[in-house]
Amino acid sequence: MTTQHQSQGTEGRDQESLVAGQFGPQAAAYVASAVHAQGEDLQQLAGLVAGKGYKTVLDLGCGGGHVAFTVAPHVGQVTACDLSPAMLAAVAAEAGRRGLVNIETRVGRADAVPSEDASFCAVVSRYSAHHWPDLVAGLREARRVVKPNGIAVFMDVVTPGQPLLDTFLQSIELLRDPSHVRNYAVAEWRAALETAGFRVTGVTERRLRLEFGSWIARMNPPDSHVAAIRSLQGRMADAVTGHFAIEADGTFTLDTATVEAVPV
C-alpha cells in the first residue's frame, strides 16, 4: 500500500485540532463507510427513538452523520455536532441528498456543546468517545444538555477488559489513528456514566468484523504504521489472535457495546 503524507509540525497541536485534522480529509470516506452506515446498533437505535415523540436529538461527535440519518425520520430536529467543519459539510451535503431537512450541523467539542442546558430529548454518540480527551467530562456535558426525562445512548468499540487484549487493541488503534485516546471496558463505561450523573438502563454487546484494507484506508496512516500493525498481529500470543479472530490479510473482529442511560 502506497500512501502520501504531508509533513506536519507538532508544536501547538491540541487533541481537538488533531482529531479535526485527522478526520477532515477523510470526511467523504466516513460518510460512505459501510461499517459506519449500517449495523444492528443503528437498527437498535431507531427502535429506541421511533414513536417516542422526541422533538430534539443531539448526535454528539457525529462523524459521518449516520446516527443523524438514522434518527431523523423519527424525530423533530437533529443537531449533528462535530469538531471538523469538513465532516459537518459532508454530513449536510448527504442529508440534502437524502432529503432529510430536519438535520442541522454545529461545530463543537464533546466537553463544550454549544447548546443550552436540557436542550435535547435524546443525546446519542457513536464511535466518538474514544477520541475524547476526558470521557467523564464529555459524559457530564451530555448530562447537561439532555432533558431530565430524556435518554442517552453511547455506542463504541470496547476493550475486553483483560490487560493483554487491552494493550493490543489500544496499540493498533493508535498506530492507525494518532487522535485515538482510549477504548474503554463496559465496566469503565458504567462507572463513568454513574460519575457523570446517569443511570445505565441497558448494555448490548456485539462483535464487529473489520476488513483490514478498508479499515486502514479510512485513516490513511503511513506505510510504517501499517507495517507495525501487521507485525503486531503476526507476533501476538494465541490469546490475542484468537480473541480478535485475526485473519491472514489482517482482517480482525473486535468488541462493541451500545449503552443506554437516563439522567438521575
Image: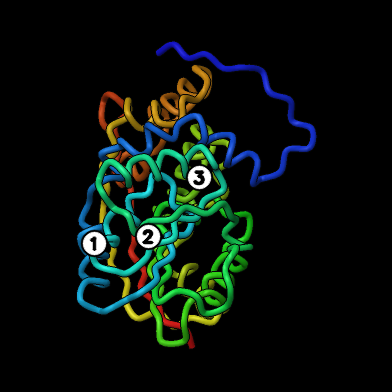
Instruction: Assign a secondary structure to mark 3.
Output: helix
- Where is mark 3, residue-wise? 170
Q: Is residue 135 left or right of residue 158?
A: right
**Mark closer to the observer (1, 2):** 1
> Picture coordinates of residue 166 (x, y %)?
47, 50
- Where is mark 1, residue-wise? 73
What's the residue at 29%, 62% (across, down)?
A: 71
> Picture coordinates of residue 158 (x, y %)?
41, 56
What's the residue at 42%, 52% (across, down)?
A: 127
Q: Residues within 10 Å of mark 3 (few under 14, many from 20)?
A: some
**Mark closer to the observer (1, 3):** 1
Instruction: Assign a secondary structure to mark 1.
Output: helix
Instruction: Assign a secondary structure to mark 2.
Output: strand
- Where is mark 2, residue-wise? 155
Q: Is residue 254 above or below residue 109?
A: above
Query: Are the residues at dot 1 and dot 3 in contact (C-beta closer than 8 Å)?
Result: no
